[in-house]
Amino acid sequence: MQAIVNISLKEGVLDPQGRAISHSLNDLGFNEVGDVRVGKQILLEIDETDPARLRQRVARMCETLLSNTVIEDYSIEIPDEQ
Amino acid sequence: MVAIEQLTSRRPALVWHKEASLDAADLVIIPGGFSFGDYLRCGALAGRSPIMNAVLDHAARGGAVMGICNGFQILTETGMVPGVLIRNAGLKFSCRNIGLRPCETLASPFTIGLDLGEDLTIPIAHNEGNYFADADELDRIEGNGQVAFRYAASDAAGPVNPNGASRDIAGVLSNNGRVLGMMPHPERAMSKLHGGTDGAKFLLKSLEALVS
């Protein structure tokens, strides 16, 4: 099964990369762009058929490695979970 | 390694990251570099290398650990020192000599020999040196005396805080004072040919406090 992990910076954490992107978009004429925040998406192919167990395991992965919970939030999507 | 050998005339043991155990040591140093190409987050993957369990055990027994630059990032990723290092606020790799101000701290072998009034000049070279913790955490570590170094208020080369670090923090201690993480590279200020010897001065004082 596939799991999708979305990682974003917590509110209040400075995002210099996002700020630079915002400035560039403004320079290109996209003046409506304000704050920009950059996150990342991690796609995992996992040998597991039970969505509940998968979600639990992926949450563990997020807590131990995939995100740094001092500065990042994560969310987990399981596309095949109906 | 060369720096420690220069100061002690003893050869430190080099330990490979895949190893699982650590011989008894007065001090474990995690040097700078770009472990795992900074993939995922700087220090994240190295922070979970097999050897790190042994380093965590060593620290839990009260053993001394120093992390420099990427080593500091690795220490924050393991939670051995508080906070985290994020991208420099100016988005530029920052590489130059910088004034470093020793702070009043809790009892620590890394700061006991330093003069509070005397700034050190030590080079930095990093892209992710922007120290971050939330305001409560910053208050807590300041209150505990865990801030070891701040970027000094003025130096010849220009603006002082080179990376946007919260409260100008350049180095922090664990809550028992036995683990130090710092962004500047003392091992790169060991001789006049390096442009200064303040790194040697700092390392020697730490070693005197740690090595029997």
Image (spheres, coloured by chain):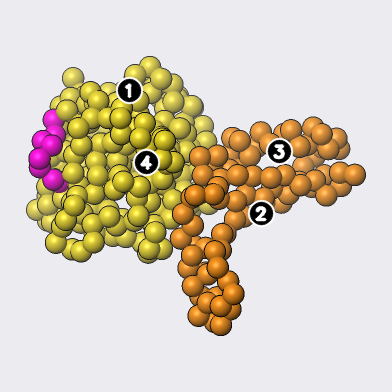
Chain colours: A orange, B yellow
The answer to whether marks 4 and 2 sit on the same chain is no
Which residue is under mark 2? A41
The answer to whether marks 2 and 1 sit on the same chain is no
Which residue is under mark 1? B176
Q: CA distance from mark 2 to mark 1?
A: 37 Å
Kind of residue at disc 3: Val
Q: Is residue B112 left or right of residue B52?
A: left
Residue located at (27% from left, 55% from top)? B161
Chain of residue at mark 4: B
Kind of residue at disc 4: Phe
Chain of residue at mark 1: B
Which residue is under mark 3? A58
Q: Residue furthest top?
A: B61
Query: Residue B139: in sight, yes or no?
Result: yes
Residue located at (86% from left, 44% from top)? A81
Q: Which residues are magenta?
A: B113-120
Which residue is under mark 4? B72
Mark 1 touches mark 3? (CB < 8 Å): no
Q: Is residue A77 left or right of residue B165?
A: right
In this view, the mark in front (4 or 2): 2
Residue B33 numbered mark, or none: none
Total marks shown come to 4
Front in this rendered view, residue B16 or B37: B37
